[in-house]
Amino acid sequence: MERVLVLNASYEPLNVCSLRRAHVLVWKGKAEVLESHDRPLRSATTNFARPNVIRLKTYVRVPRGVTRRISRRVLFARDGWQCAYCGSGSNRLTLDHVVPRSRGGTSVWENVVASCAPCNHSKGDRLLEETSMTLRTTPRPPTPVLFIRLTTESIPEVWRTYLPGVGAAAA
């Protein structure tokens, strides 16, 4: 299935959608094509640009207080597939609550990190101050670009100029 990058009116990346959905948005006048493929979309009587990147014509306010559900795949990708405590790239990553749920911690992006099984086991239900462990980075909600990278097998070259933090050499 062909995927199309959707940008807000401010050129901020929003999402990835199907080619069909992108064409409908353009045809209804709700979006414009910024980048298109060489091959057009064809109907019985007309050719249309085959969108690769579209931009919405009106700004869509993205609620900042609302974040997406936590999933292990997104969490591990956010943390670079490495333990947040020791940095190992173990294939036995687990989800760890920085402030344990037994101590009042909640399951929010700012309180969960990827942890290798040995670090998670040694931390247990203790606070960081009660252990000799430290976090390598401060946990934050993932960026929309991370979700875009996870929904596509590879980032097309024409998308890279619109995605911050995804250079020409990144994949």
Image (tube, helix red, strand yellow):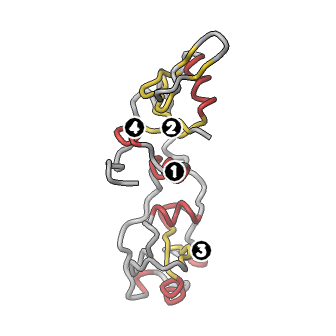
Between discs 1 and 2, the one toward the N terminus: 2
Between discs 4 and 2, the one toward the N terminus: 2
Residue wearing tag 4? 158
Distance (Cα) linking label 1 and label 4: 18 Å
Residue ID at (59%, 32%): 19
Any mark on residue 1, and which? none
Give the mark toward the camera: 4 or 2: 4
Question: Dot 1 lies on which element?
Answer: helix
Between discs 3 and 2, the one toward the N terminus: 2
Quadrant of the rendering where the N terminus is positioned:
top right
Number of residues whose C-alpha sits closer than 10 Å to that of mark 2, classed few (under 14), some (14–19) or many (20 or more): few
Residue ID at (38%, 66%): 138
Give the mark toward the camera: 3 or 2: 2
Question: Dot 4 lies on which element?
Answer: helix
Give the mark toward the camera: 1 or 2: 1
Amino acid of disc 4: Val
Distance (Cα) linking label 3 and label 2: 29 Å
In the rendering, at what x and y percent does residue 69 appear?
Answer: 60, 55
Q: Are marks 1 and 4 in contact (CB under 8 Å)?
A: no
Residue nearest the observer in this picture, 93 or 140: 93
In the rendering, at what x and y percent does residue 8 appear?
Answer: 46, 31
Residue wearing tag 3? 101
Residue wearing tag 1? 147
